[in-house]
């Protein structure tokens, strides 16, 4: 799938937030994606974050950090199929931008940022184990692609579960709720796209196999 078609499919999932827009960006065929634009952090006149909001924000940062790590591992491999390279590049850039914005919110609220806690406890559903990450790092060719896709599908499913739990059961801050809705919409579309890249009959969640 050329990068333009992949990016178009992913952009359809992006939710325009009331205060901060998370817009997925992709370049044309053969061109690198546009550089992410840092946005000013506005925190006035909104409901302060509840403990559930802060917990979700920190856990989602750690969750995103692992997705970025997985994607950068793939991008370092030679001979990667173009559509997999496009996907990994998109995920690495898009989720790093969300990490930076979420940490900026935490800092503006007087909270410690969550950067660098990928391997900590409580990082949320769908996180891969160190052994699974090592398997992706060491694999090559079709095996690497299969491990990456199955692992990332399960990883995305975990992020969607975390986001739905926040919206259904706790939290009250418009920024964090906007992020959760964005994660559900975008990552559900990415799950569908990645599932379509797998050979028929491949079992999702087999990243350690």
Image (cartoon, rainbow, N blue to C red):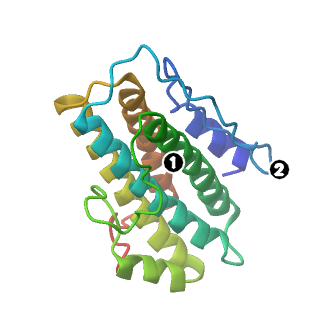
Question: Label 1 belongs to which residue?
Answer: 99
Q: Residue furthest right?
A: 30
Classify 10 Å Cα crowding around label 2: few (below 14), some (14-19), many (20 and above): few
Query: Residue at image x 32%, y 66%?
Result: 120
Name the side, left or right, on which 198 lies relative to 26. Answer: left
Q: Pinpoint residue 77: horizontal percent, then vertical percent.
A: 66, 77
Quadrant housing residue 72:
bottom right
Quadrant housing residue 133:
bottom left
Query: Vertically, is 101 above or below 62?
Result: above
Classify 10 Å Cα crowding around label 1: few (below 14), some (14-19), many (20 and above): many
Q: What quarter of the picture does the C terminus occupy?
A: bottom left
Whole-number angstrom distance, CA of label 1 to CA of label 2: 24 Å
Which secondary structure lies at badge 1? helix
Question: Label 2 belongs to which residue?
Answer: 31
Q: Residue furthest front?
A: 110
Q: Nearer the viewer, residue 156 or 172?
A: 172
Q: Pinpoint residue 172: horizontal percent, then vertical percent.
A: 27, 24
Query: Residue at image x 42%, y 34%?
Result: 109
Q: Nearer the viewer, residue 157 or 128?
A: 128
Which secondary structure lies at badge 2? loop
């Amino acid at each position: 799938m050329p990068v333009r078609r992949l990016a178009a499919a992913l952009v359809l999932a992006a939710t325009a937030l009331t205060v901060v827009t998370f817009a997925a960006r992709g370049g044309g065929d053969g061109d690198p994606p546009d550089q992410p634009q840092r946005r000013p952090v506005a925190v006035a006149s909104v409901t302060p974050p509840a403990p559930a909001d802060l917990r979700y924000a920190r856990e989602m940062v750690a969750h995103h950090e692992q997705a970025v790590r997985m994607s950068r591992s793939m991008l370092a491999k030679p001979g990667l199929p173009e559509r997999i390279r496009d996907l990994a590049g998109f995920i690495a850039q898009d989720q790093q931008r969300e990490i930076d914005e979420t940490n900026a919110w935490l800092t503006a609220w007087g909270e410690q940022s969550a950067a660098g806690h990928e391997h900590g406890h409580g990082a949320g559903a769908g996180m891969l184990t160190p052994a699974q990450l090592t398997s992706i790092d060491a694999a090559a060719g079709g095996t690497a692609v299969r491990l990456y896709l199955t692992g990332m599908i399960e990883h995305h499913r975990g992020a969607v579960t975390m986001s739905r739990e926040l919206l259904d059961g706790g939290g009250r801050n418009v920024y964090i709720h906007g992020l959760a809705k964005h994660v559900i919409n975008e990552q559900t579309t990415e799950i569908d796209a990645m599932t379509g890249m797998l050979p028929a009959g491949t079992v999702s969640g087999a990243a350690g196999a």
